Amino acid sequence: MNENHLEIYNDKWIVANRGEKNHLNSQKPYDWLVEKERTASGTIEEVGTIFLTNKECPFHCLMCDLWKNTTDKSVPVGDIPSQIEWALLQMPKVKHLKLYNNGSFFDKKAIPKSDYSHIAKLLEGFETVIVESHPKFINESCIEFKNLLKPKLQMAIGLETVHPEILQKLNKKMTLDDFKKAVNFLQQEGISSRAFILLRPPFLTENEGVYWAKKSIDFAFNVGVESCVVIPVRAGNGAMDVLLKKDHFHPPTIQSLEVVLAYGLSLNAGRVFADIWDIKYFSNCHKCIDKRIQRLTHMNLNQQLENKVLCSCSLN
């Protein structure tokens, strides 16, 4: 681990190193997409994702760049349902939907509780709905929303890493016990969960990044999550760029993502996905990148190991 105990990466430091936010319309989501995903039942189906425009998350995590597409103030009551309704009219019909709001769905300042019933009405035709939340917001509001829904609810929670020192440095304001309690609370209410896991957060070497990502997958499944999503860490949010310049952070390689995904799948403990958004950022080899993307995509969809990609870049 790259030892660095002198600087404190708190809210003030992280926000001070940011750039500008994107200009958003609170009556429209800032994006949406449809992609294939392996479902819990084992089928490969189209899953829609709506990226909701809402108030910035109160937790300023060191590695997060999601604040770029948030507002400074809470959006008016009724705007979130309007965003969902607008997006559903644009996208093809799907049975599974993710509502990602760059924070916590159950943060009252992000998603007004008075909108829950309207949102639930819009979601009646779906089989599953996935929302995201920090463990500190997983409480009775989750149950209230679940009881309004016809689809099955799943919660996406950022575990990030089980390395205790790194987790603290990420300014997540969460402990591993907080995560475990949140998952247990959801399990008791019949709500499944998926964990977001970081590959090579700051202050770790490449090998350490792989090791702790594997340990994080182990922990997540041991406490009861249904699936894990491995996210390679990148620069671009201001704070991470400063750490990159100071040699406290380097993005992981696509080969490391392959190794961690293969490890997760070998456990047969639940679904494991590699986040391959803009994945070329993590490769320096034009000769094998397409084959590696294809391999990761196939493993995501089939949840089975694929033959390794052989390339001279792996020998360097």
Image: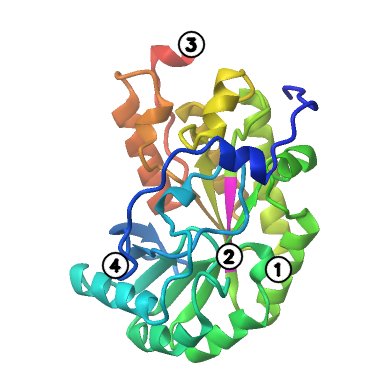
Read off the residue under disc 2. 133
- Mark 1–mark 3 contact, CB under 8 Å? no
Read off the residue under disc 1. 182
Q: Is residue 301 magenta?
A: no
Residue type, numbered disc 4:
Lys
Residue at point 24%, 73% (across, down)? 86
Choose the circle earlier in sequence order: 4 or 3: 4
Residue at point 44%, 29% (across, down)? 308
Choose the circle earlier in sequence order: 1 or 3: 1
Residue at point 53%, 84% (across, down)? 145
Residue type, numbered disc 3:
Leu
Instruction: Count neighbours of disc 1 (C-alpha within 10 A) and say few if under 14, some if 14 to 19, many if 20 or more.
Output: many
Read off the residue under disc 4. 28
Image quarter of residue 293: top left
Calculate the distance from the C-alpha at mark 2 to the C-alpha at mark 3.
41 Å
Magenta segment, which residues? 193-197
Residue type, numbered disc 1:
Ala
- For the N terminus, the quadrant is top right
- Mark 2–mark 1 contact, CB under 8 Å? yes
